Image (cartoon, grey):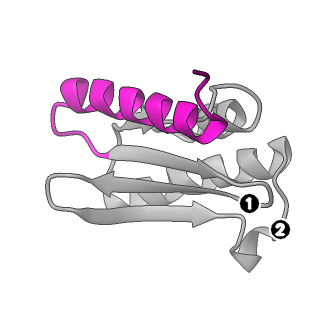
Amino acid sequence: MALKKQELFQKRRLRVRNKLRAMSNGRPRMSVHRSSKNISVQIIDDLKGVTLASASTLEKDFGVVGKNNVEAAAKIGAAIAERAKKAGVEEVVFDRGGFIFHGKVKALADAAREGGLKF
């Protein structure tokens, strides 16, 4: 029996999360969520259960409200790197969720690396 698209996504997401949990060594997790209209990212300290920094295309400061393209993802990546530096975070583990590391997710990750985050 073939699995549904959502079930495959959940399997990928859990597989990625379990691998990250094994190799995190106490580093915060940078979690990416991509919808059809927006993209958002959070830096989460799983030990304390606290969000340290976040950025999203829903914020009006970036001028990309409701856009979900590679340029918007790059702006969000640069913004999260800057906000992470303010929060005192330099190293994270990258949690792509069930999303494929290609296109928008890759652009966000590359911009965050250029901004100074290490993962």
Q: Identify the magenta region.
A: 1-28
> Which element type, helix, strand or loop, lies under badge 2?
loop
Q: Quadrant of the N terminus?
A: top right
Depth order, front residue of 67/36: 36
Instruction: Check disc 2: other Cα within 10 Å, few if <14, some if 14-19, many if 20+.
Output: some
On the image, the x and y values in percent for residue 6 come to: 60, 41
Depth order, front residue of 3/32: 3
Q: State the image quarter where residue 112 is shown.
A: top right
**Which residue sits at x=74%, y=38%?**
104
> Which element type, helix, strand or loop, lies under badge 1?
loop
**Which residue sits at x=85%, y=60%?**
67
Please check the rendered image and state whether residue 71 is part of the magenta-colored stretch, yes or no.
no
Q: Up-down: is 76 above or below 25?
A: below
On the image, the x and y values in percent for residue 88 come to: 31, 55
On the image, the x and y values in percent for residue 38 come to: 74, 60
**Residue at the disc numbered 2:** 66
Can residue 65 be spotted in the picture?
yes
**Which residue sits at x=62%, y=34%?**
4
Q: Is 102 displayed left or right of 116 in the figure?
A: right
Q: CA distance from mark 2 to mark 1?
A: 6 Å
Instruction: Check disc 1: other Cα within 10 Å, few if <14, some if 14-19, many if 20+.
Output: some
Q: Main secondary structure of the magenta part?
A: helix
Q: Quadrant of the C terminus?
A: top left
**Which residue sits at x=44%, y=37%?**
95
Is the C-beta separation of discs 2 and 1 under 8 Å?
Answer: yes
Q: Is 23 displayed left or right of 35 in the figure?
A: left
Name which of mark 2 and mark 1 comes first in the sequence.
1
Callout 1, which amino acid?
Asn
Disc sitting over residue 38 in the figure: 1
Depth order, front residue of 13/34: 13
Q: Up-down: is 37 above or below 8?
A: below
Please check the rendered image and state whether residue 6 is part of the magenta-colored stretch, yes or no.
yes
